[in-house]
Structures are given as structure tokens and as C-alpha cells.
Image (cartoon, helix red, strand yellow):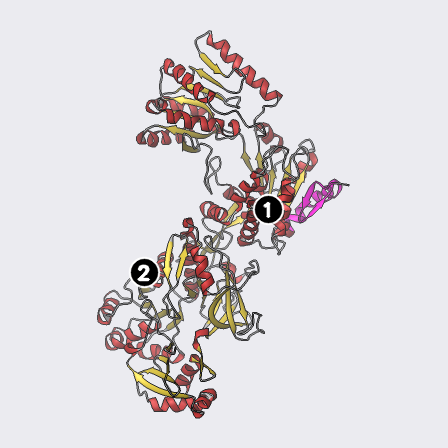
Amino acid sequence: MTVHHHYWQGSFIGDEEAGRRLADLPAVVEAALATVLETETVLAACDALATALRDPAHPVRAKLAAHLPAGEDPAVLAELGGLLGRRELTRKLRRELGSATPERLNRADPRETVYEAWAPVGLVAHIAPGNAATVAPLSVVEGLLAGNVNILKTSSSDTLLTQHLMAELAALDPSGALAARIVVLRFPSSRQEWLRLMCAPADAVAVWGGEGAVEGVASHVPAGCRLVEWGHRISFAYLTGDAWSDPLTLGALADDVCLHEQQACSSPQVVYLDTEDEGEVFAFAERFAAVLAARPPAVAAASAAEPDPAEAAELTTTELMARLEEHLGLTRVFAAPDGSWRVMADTRSPLTASPLHRSVWVKPLPRKRLIATLRPMRRYLQTAGLAGSRTDIAELSRTALAAGVTRVTPVGAMLESYAGEPHDGVYALQRYSRRVAVQADPDRFATTACLDDLARPVVLPPPTGPLLGKEDVQELGRQVARADAELYFRSGGSTGAPALSIFSYDDYDTQMHAAARGLLAAGYDPVGDRTANLFYCGGMYGSFISFFSVLERLGGVQLPLSAGPDHRATAQALIDHGADTLFGMPSYLWQLLHAEADALRAYGGLRKVFYGGEHFTQEQQRTLKDTFGIETVRSITYGSTDLGPLGYQCTESSGGVHHLHADLHTMEVLDLAEDRPVAAGETGRLVFTTHARRGQRLGRYVIGDLGREVPGRCPCGRHAPRFELRGRTGDVMRVATYFLNHRRFLALAEERGGHRGELQIRLDGTDARERLTVRVERSGPTDPERLREVFLTGYPELRSAVTERLLDLVVEAVDGASLDRSPTSGKLLAVVDTRH
């Protein structure tokens, strides 16, 4: 059977076909770059693959294990899975490119219409090393995270592990965008024509290996193309006098030497002592030799445990030369009889490469000569493992970095790393990216926070899995890992008992940036507006804190007053500090404005109101504009405590119409009674799936709100889908065998009864029948009897229930302060049901 050694954009192919396609590589790259690769597409596929790799029983892991090099521990697949998880890759993106969606053209400064993003360089050619099972696939993943097309060369002696890994990764992306950006070829370096065809159209060439490997590729790199060298490096340990006499330090140093048999670039090859005394060097070498002698032998199954003939020759030659120089008083050698380790003390300070395999040089180097001694080797330096006092560590870290070192760690941790750590002094994702900018007209783009919103729709992986209710989400919250449980919020409890929501700070930051972009779209001006934050605060309620964070990210002027009972003091603060923009809950803002109407009308400075958590009715908005001179009344965001911001209004939106935060969520509208999509434009249950959450997966969450999709593209030009809120499922009441809707009562009161205030329904059970009480805020010429007639006339189901003597209908006018509200958020409770 013919084995196809090459993976090309979703298919395994043979040599002849690969050669034909290589000749047409420039056209292949252009076609792939014409499509958009969302970072979320990469993260979702990598996370799914990581889950499979970490599960010993998963069929994908079993399939890939068959392609591991001989003697390679299958645990390497689990290690690879640990590096490909969403948490690690999201952290890497944030650390290296500043965002989990670095490809989007967002405002660099919210106060300016300048948009910046990280764009792919185009085509990245990766030249992978042999005998390093995880390097090649991880290099390609880095290229994908930066949005590039990637062509990878593996050694002709390698197995097909990388090809099959990339095939499994691409198969997890139903859009095909990943497959279009991955080519993996296996051929020997002697095949120079293929190497030339790989590199000729490349925008960056990443080479893993020593100077010989880099030189062999460099001749094929075209002018202007980035050559990214991931070459061999030398690392060392540096010990002060206090440290080298500590047995714990010697044990930690031995760990660094023995782990991976010094095959890692961060393994110590030289141990420097902060001394000029040759006797101390020889004495330390002897003590350290005893520590190495007590270590277990290398694991025979490890690929690097047994040196090959060339390495064995180098080991023998190095040790013999050091023994010869013992006669000159320059060196002293301590070695195992079987040659499994050696410590070579040398009185000369210059850096000397080790032949590895537990072979260590020990040299004197007083700190005053550290820079002069090491700087000539700066191109090759990587890690310095330091041991000393706190002051020593601080001083020596700066000195080592000045000498050319790129990493400083404690002794005993030289081979450890962290997610997003720079490699050899650079961030890989930045080497595979370009920083791009677009300047736009400030007047025409004043409300455009992200230029991509006008250019294309966001395409995220389709939602899958079962529907989740509030209790399901609460259970998921209880399972959040401690590392991701960094910020706790409680809901306002307006539709039930307050629920706990847990976030990582990264997730919170992502959501606050999204809410900030939505606020710009709604017409907020971070340069000109002076904002009073009047949301409720305390009790773990998130509104005030969240919009404080939003304004902080926008750089807007803020008066963090919060909602308080002293309306006079609040109004005076607005006047004293020149506030012209109010953030808050409609019910609170309505109370504040009417309680201090005379003072605020006389002030005349209020221009904008951005509200959240509830809705201002059309009549209430008219009152705000006619009575208080407010020009803009718009939703600040639509969201929930557990999902964060879900939608935003633009300057073309009104009522309950919002754009979806399509870079964070996907939305479904399902039938009220069955779990199926409604027909286009029909009202149903809103179901959201959040994609940009590191700490927990919230998929297909039935949030409890009703809505409908708004067809067509918005006049504002954005591609983000639109939806219209049509109330909550809790607003629909089953009373006296009929289903009645709070929003219907509100619409009738406004449109036919001229009511402009708040409205609340209370349901009670009596001995005879149920009672429905409509409580309306006493404002203007409120006539309860007139409203009762309006309800009966305009609501046939209600009229039938009353006529059939199944229901008592009462309408009463009350002060707004006496209406029932959530004690946490201050929200008006639309329906208060006291029936048992």
C-alpha cells in the first residue's frame, strides 16, 4: 500500500502530487488569505483536540499514539494536550498580542478613530527539527493563532505524527478555515528544490536547529522575509558563596542537570561560582560530583538517554582533554566509572559548551567580571539559574540580562516554563504577525468601535450540546476551577433568588471591552460626556462595578455616585460637577429625576441617559426628552450577570432592538414550547452560547428572555445580527386558565390610557377566586377606573376571565416608592406572585 507522507489542506497526498502543488503555492496562499480566520475557530479546535489528547481512552489519542517515535512515552500526547487547552492558548494570546481576539481592528485609544490590530504576515514556512515530537505541531499552532497560512517541513526520519495531529485539528473545524491554512511535508533537507519552493513565497521562515540548520535554510529566504531562528542555546547556573554550601541548592542543581539529560536549551552546562578562589571551585566540584553520583541512572527508554556514536566520541574527547590539563593545574575531573556523569572543574572563566548527558563544567566568575566574560557569547545565551540571597538575586538578574541572558530562574527551576513565556527573548506570535493601523474620519466613524463590524460578519463555531437552564448554569459555576474563580457576582434577584456568577479576570476584561465598544456604538462620547454612574452598588451586585470598569476602559469622565436614597444630594452632585450623562436603572433614574425635577430642570445640563437592567417605555422616554431636555435615551447594554454583555444598541436602534455581541456569543431563537428554531421573525426563547470564556463553558443557555431576530442589515452598516427583546418568560402569567402578558398591560396603559409611569402586577389567591392587581405609579392625571376599562376593552383574554368570574381585576395608583423592587439591584419587579 502506498503511504502518503504529506498532508495538504485536508488531504493526505504522495510525492508527485505534493511536487505539483508546491509549484502553485503562491496561488494557494492567496486563496486561503482571502478568507477570514477567527481566533475563536483556532481556540475551539485546539481545545477539543486537547481534551482528546488528555484522555487515555479517547480514540483520537490511540490513533495518534501509533505514530509516536519508537520508545516515545505516550504521555507526551497528554503533555501536548496540556499546552493546547483554551486556558493556555488564551493566556498566550493575551500576553503576546494583548487580546484574545487580536485580529479585530479595534480602537487603539477609545477617544480616537484610529484602529489597530495584529495581522498575519501571510505565509509562515516552518523547518522543524528531527526527534522533537511536539515542536512541529506547536509551531504550526502558533502560526494559526496569528492567522497565517502554514507550510511545515518535517525530517524524512520523522514519523507521520505531525501530519495526523494537524489532520485531527483541522477535522475539528467544520468551517474548513484551519485546513486551508495547514500544509505538512516530509522530505530530506537534501531536497533543495522543495525547500526553495517552500520558502520563495514565504513572509516568515521559522527554523528550529543549530547554526548548520539555519545556514542551510537562509540561502532560500527571499529579501524582506523574516528569518525566525529558534536555534540551540547555552544556559548556566550562577551560585553565590552562601548558596553553593547549601545541600538543598546542590540537590536542586542536580535536578536541572538530570532532567532531560541536559538536552533542553535551558539545561545548565556550566556552573559559575561567585569567586576567584580556585580551591573553592575544586572543592565544590567534588561535593557536587557526590550529589550526581547519588542520582538514579537515566531512563533507558528516553530518546536522549543514550548518546549516539558522535556524541559518545565528544564525551570521551572532552573528558580526556580535561584530564590532560589536570597536569597543568588548570582542571580537575570527577567522573562516574561507567561514564554516566562527569563534573569538570576549570580555573578559566570563559563559557565552554558541555558535551551534555550529565556533563557539567564548574568555573569561577566573580560578579564584577560577569558581563565582560559572558557578553561575547550573548547570541547563544538563554537561561541563568541563580542561587543567592534576595538582594543577590535582584542584582545578579539585572547583570545577567545585561550580559545577554533572556531568562532568569531559580536553581532547580531552569527547565520550568509558564504559559505565554517569551522564547529566546521574543514572543513567537509577534514574530508571526504585523501590527497594522487604519485612521478614519472622526465625524463619520465617531460611533464605530470596531472597523470589522462594518466589513464582515463574525463566524463562530455553531452551538452544540443540550440546553441549559439557570440551575444547570449554577451547577457549572460550582465546578469552576479555583484558578478561574477570581471574581464573584450575584444577580439582582428580580426573577427569583439571587444567583452566583463566577469569572476569571481575563473573561471579565474581555466582556468590559465588549461593553465599552457597544457603548460607543450607542452614541457615548468618551471625550465630551461627563458621566454619573448611578447603578446600584454593594452586595456583590455587578452593575456599578462593571460600568465603572467600562468607563475606565473608555477613558471617560466619571462621577461614581451609585444609586442612593438621598436624591437631593445626588442631584446637587450632578449640578456641582457638571454631569450631562446618566448611567443607571430606569426605575431609579425615573425616581431621581421626578424627585428633583425643579432643580434638574433649572440646571438644564442633562443631555444623555444610558439605562440597563430594565426598559424605559416610549412614553417615559418622551417625558425625559420633553420635561428634562434629554436628547439621547438609549440602552447601555443588554446582558445578564452570568453571561455578561450580550447585545448593544447603535444610534439606529430603538426600543428593545439590539445588535448581538457576535464576537463573544452566538444566539438561537427557539419555540416557546418545543426545542426547535422558530420561523424567521417570530418571537421565541432567546438562547445564547458564550465562546469567549476561559473559566467555564456556557453553551445554549436559555436565559429566560423572549425575543425575535430582526431581519436585514442594520442602517448603521454593522453586520452583527439584530434581535428585539419581547419581555421575559416570567412576564407571561398563567392566571385563571389564561396566559396574560405584563408587556400587554404596559402597552395598553401607555397607548390608550396615557400612562407614563411605572406599572407592576400583583397576583394573589383568595378564597373565591384569583385577584390581579395592576399597580400604577401615580403620575399626572392617573385615573385607575379609566385604566381598568382600557385593560378590559383592549385585552380580550383578561375580559373573558373577569366576565366568567374567574378573576378579580383591581387597578390602583400608588407612589413609585411603594412598588416592590429587588433589594439588590433596585429593579422594579414586573410581576409579584404571592399565590401558593
Please tell me which residue lies in front, 95 or 49.
Answer: 49
**473 sits to left or right of 338:** left
Where does the image place residue 150, in percent across and percent down from the top left?
61, 44
For marks 2 and 1 on the same chain, the one whose residue lies earlier in the sequence: 1
- In the rendered image, which quarter contains the C terminus? bottom left
Q: Residues within 10 Å of mark 1 (few under 14, many from 20)?
A: few
Regarding mark 1 in the picture, which secondary structure is present there?
loop
Viewer-proximal residue among 515 and 198: 515
- Residue lying furthest top in this view? 327
Which label sits on residue 557?
A: 2
Which contiguous range is marked in magenta?
3-30
Q: Amino acid at mark 1?
A: Ala
Tell me the residue at 57%/58% (across/down).
461
Q: Is residue 196 left or right of residue 226?
A: right
Element class at badge 2: strand
Quadrant position of residue 302 = top right
